[in-house]
Amino acid sequence: MSIALDETAASGFATKAAAAAGGLVILVALLAAGAGAGIASLLGAAAATPSATATSAIPPAMLALYQQAATTCPGLPWTVLAAIGTIESDNGQSTLPGVQSGANSAGAEGDMQELASTFAEYDTPVPPGGANPPSPYDPTDAVYAAARMLCANGAANGANLNQAIFDYNHATWYVNEVLALAQTYDQTEAQTVAAGTAGGVAVDWALAQVGTPYIWGGETPGVGFDCSGLVQAAYKVAGISLPRVAQDQYDGTAKLGPDDPLQPGDLIFFGQGPTDVTHVGIYIGNGQMVDAPYTGADVRVETTPTTPGAQWGSDIVVGVTDPTK
């Protein structure tokens, strides 16, 4: 089941959001140039601090609602819910058909522009403060239903956020707009992307590959990656040339000291020691990395230790490096 969107209305809301964000046009251009999906550390954004863009564009009650509803789905950033709500209905403030009552030309209803059948599939249990019976025109009911749908379609535990957003409207442009706007709502991520760091671009691009199969020796988007192939390809998009295999990537990049803070884009290496590196992942923040793990698995986001010497399965963390130095 999908949620329909009035494309004309969405374009208008997206334009308004872009103007409010100020830097959103630059951000979208950066993402397009880097072929990334604009996820960056959004997967770890459950506790993200709202940016000035978020607090100026979203009414306080709706901002709190997005944050509360997102907690029902581990791996779903509240910023993504907020971006969808902004694009769909200007956070419930739009007077276009289907927002306050009735349906738009695609049959979508309410604050999150859900089809009646889709809303009915995800409207229970009634959330705290929601209407009973549930209504798509009740902000609480609508936002919680949207969170449940995203969770069911790939957002749970960060399995495939791109797919979850795509299933909301079945359009690639929509995924890109949601993710770009979501970044401007997270204070830390907005600053990272605004700075145009190579690490942020590499992370965005790598996260766009989530769900791609692991293939030994793979280095092709949509076909397959191995761990170092993913790293090399992501940094190539960011304008940095890295060696092809994990050991050479470890040897050829700047090592971080024990007191150096990790940043999105840093590389975490695993193996038995400095001369026996067998795996690498790209740190995305909040104790998580994106990596191509092993044959039979897909590119994914997973929790990672970051302290050299820490155990990771049968391997240890060999070290962390910054490939941008």
Image (cartoon, grey):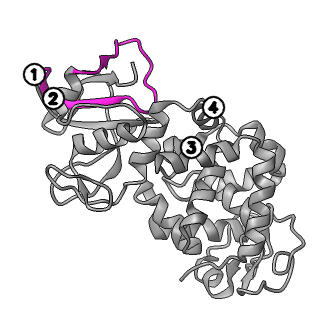
Q: In the structure shown, which secondary structural element does the residue marked by tag 1 occupy?
A: loop
- What is the quadrant of residue 324 in the picture? top left
Left or right of 313, for residue 208 = right
Q: Which mark is residue 191?
A: 4
Residue for badge 2: 247
Give the residue at x 60% y 47%: 29
Q: Earlier in the sequence, mark 4 or mark 2?
A: 4
Q: In the structure shown, which secondary structural element does the residue marked by tag 3 occupy?
A: helix
For marks 4 and 2, give the CA distance: 32 Å
User: Closer to the camera: disc 2 or disc 1?
Assistant: 2
Q: Earlier in the sequence, mark 2 or mark 1?
A: 2
Left or right of 64, for residue 183 = left
Q: Which mark is residue 275?
A: 1
Q: Which mark is residue 30?
A: 3
Range of residues picked out in magenta: 252-275
Label 4 close to label 1 by CB (< 8 Å): no
Q: Earlier in the sequence, mark 3 or mark 1?
A: 3
